[in-house]
Amino acid sequence: MEGFHAWVEQNCPKEIRGKPLKYSGGTKHKIPSPAFELWFNACVERGLTVPEWSPDYGGAGLNKIDAAAFREALNEVGAPLPLFGGGIAMLGPTIIEFGTEAQKKRHLPRIARGEVCWCQGYSEPGAGSDLASLRTRADDHGDYYLVNGSKIWTSGAHMSDWIFCLVRTDQDAPKQKGISFLLFPLDAPGVTVRTIDLINGGSEFCEAFFDDAKAAKDDLIGELNDGWTIAKRLLQYERASVSRGEFLPRGGNLPAALKKYAPDDAVARDNVLRIEMDDAAFQLTKARATQASMGSRTPDFATSTFKYLSSELESRRLEAIIAMAGTLGIGWTGDTFEADELKTTRSWLLSRGFLIAGGSSEVQRNIVAKRVLGLPD
């Protein structure tokens, strides 16, 4: 597909351009507006909700370079992503790599059309960074599994239809050896979801409880007890999406904030310049990595570098704005603060969690040291 800019210009209504609109599909999310619906339907028709997927599964069949060109066209025009979420960024690519043909045909087109919203069931109260210590179990009951246990920090579970979940299927195997990757609906009997109030005022994180919840054996992805391999690959897909800014959009314009709050502050100016230069270098490095990985459809361990840099740069960006704004940067509510100031404060609070989500910065540095640089343990 050629002429991405012209196509986006023609099909994206002007009234939704430049607005922070997001749509995750599924049965619980409302489409933002009639104008957004026109844009969404146009993208679905051309396979551009999942541009790199095969047309057989609802995609456009683009290579990485063309998919990146499409995303750049969205940025140039100010068009919002037509569809957003874990189904596209994480689960879909994982099913493409590890799923059976029947699983691909059953799940991927529904993700591409926005019919199902997915969430991730990884972390548990006693299994966070040490994820392999998870205790949620799935016991074999013939043609289905019974799932018992709980998950925490499950982003968007209250607004999702299905969950992709790590479960222990061999209770005697050591840690990673007895884990499987399982899909099941959140409206199944025995599933309870509760939201968690966050420091930024939101409640997008949840805890989920499973009490004899049924999961079909047809929705076991990959081999039984080999879920750890799949889990690690999915985390690479997640980190790649985070580095593209799909889960942590930029929370402020640094040069504009400098001009507004600290136009004559040499120290602030130097800090802003360093962050902007680091970000420019990061964007160029990502572009080079995209070109270098043209022959592969799966991410490598360099995604840990990108995830680390993207979340750290965004945190530095927001901290710089907060510091320059002074007391105007710590507003929570009230007429004395502008809407952008309140948004920046809450974005900064949320950004702290992204230094942990998807693998903490410390974990990413360890992966880079071992898998990218080849340093000894």
Image (tube, helix red, strand yellow):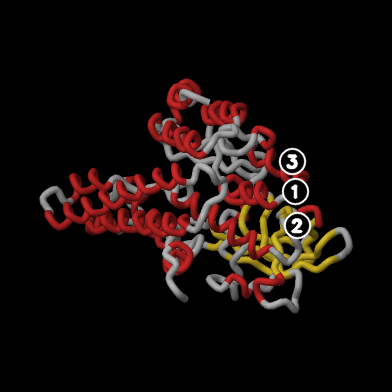
In the rendered structure, which amino acid carries the disc numbered 3? Lys
Residue 62 location, x and y as percent? Answer: 55, 34
Q: Residue furthest right?
A: 142
Which amino acid lies under the numbered mark 2 shown in the image of this protein?
Answer: Leu
Element under disc 2:
strand
Residue at 10%, 50% in the rendered image: 264
Q: Which residue is mark 1?
A: 100
Residue at image mark 3: 105
Q: Are marks 2 and 3 in contact (CB under 8 Å)?
A: no
SS for callout 1? loop
Structural distance between the alpha carbons of marks 3 and 1: 9 Å
Q: Name the residue tied to disc 2.
A: 220
> What distance separates the C-alpha of mark 1 from that of mark 2?
10 Å
Q: Is residue 73 left or right of residue 341?
A: right
Sequence-wise, which precedes: disc 3 or disc 1? 1
Q: Which circle's residue, 1 or 2, is located before the other in the chain?
A: 1
Task: Decide: few, some or many residues near mark 1? Use Cα within 10 Å; few <14, some 14-19, many ≥20.
Answer: some
As drawn, 86 above or below 179: above
